[in-house]
Image (cartoon, helix red, strand yellow):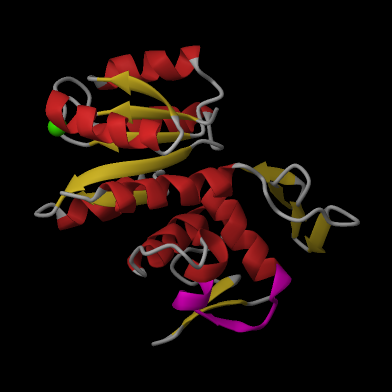
Amino acid sequence: MKKVLVLEDEASIRGFIVINLRRAGYDVIEAESGEEALERLRENPDARVALLDIMLPGIDGFEVCRRIRATNSRIGIIMLTARSQEMDKVTGLMTGADDYVTKPFSPAELTARVDALVRRSGGEDPPQATGELSQPPFLLNTRNRTLEKNGQRIKLTQVEYSIMRVFMENPGKALSREEILDMVWGRDYFGELKIVDVNIRRLRLKIEDNVQNPAYITTVWGYGYKWGL
Ligand code: CA
C-alpha cells in the first residue's frame, strides 16, 4: 500500500486527514511533532508523500521540510498552510516542498493533491528507448530520473525533474504556465499557477549559471517559460 506521513500537532485536524487518506486507500503514518516525523520517516523510507503542518511546537514544518530534503529528494512534500499565511506558501516551496494545501480543505481536495504527487513520485513515465536526453551541458536520464550538468549530478525533487523533462522535450518552445501545470501535475489537478513559478524559481537556483539572468529557463512575459537551448 502507498505510504503517506501526516505531521500535524492538532489531534482533531490530524484525525480528519488520517481518516480521509485511509478511506482513499493510503497506509498512513502519523506524527505530532517535527522530530517525531523525521523519526517516522527514518523507519519508513518507502513513504511516498509527507504532509507537513507549519506551526508546530519544537522545529517547524519548514525546518522539517529542509531536513527531509537534505537526504531525500524523491519523496513528495505538501505543506499545510493557513489561509492568512500567504507568504508561507512560497517559503515552503522554496525550502523544497512540492505543493501546499490551504486550511480548511475538503477531503476531495486533499486526496487529489496527494494522488497527484504519488503519481509524480512513482516514476510512471512511459519507458524510452534510450533513457537519455542530452542537451549539453545537460544530460537527463529518464530511467533513473536524474540530471547532470557538465557531468555533475544536480539533486532534483520529483517535480523539478518532471519540469526539466517537459522543457528538454520541448526545446525552444514557449510553454504557458497552464501547459506546464497540466503536463507536470496532471490535468485533473486543481492547484494554483503560482506553484509553477515557485518550482521554476527553485529549479533555476539549481541549474542556472546566473540566476539573475537565466540562460536556460527564460521567462516569456505574460505567458510562461521557454527552454532556451
Ligand atoms: Ca499546528
- Image quarter of the N terminus: top right
Residue at image coords 63%, 77%: 228
Residue at image coords 37%, 64%: 190
Q: Nearer the viewer, residue 39 or 24?
A: 24
Examine the rendering and report whether any part of residue 114 can be seen.
yes
Q: Quadrant of residue 174?
A: bottom right
User: Tag count in the figure?
Assistant: 0
Picture coordinates of residue 151, whole percent (x, y)? 77, 47
- Image quarter of the C terminus: bottom right
Q: Nearer the viewer, residue 220 or 213?
A: 220
Picture coordinates of residue 133, whole percent (x, y)? 80, 60
Residue 76 in magenta?
Answer: no
Picture coordinates of residue 168, whole percent (x, y)? 70, 67
- Residue stretch in magenta: 169-180
164 sits to left or right of 108:
right
Residue at image coords 75%, 42%: 144
Q: Nearer the viewer, residue 204 or 35?
A: 35
Picture coordinates of residue 131, whole percent (x, y)? 84, 52
Q: Residue furthest right?
A: 129
Q: Nearer the viewer, residue 100 or 28?
A: 28
Dividing the image into four equal quarters, which quarter contains ligand 1?
Answer: top left
38 sits to left or right of 162:
left
Q: Residue furthest bottom?
A: 222
Residue 166 against residue 219 in the figure, above or below: above
Residue 112 against residue 222 in the figure, above or below: above
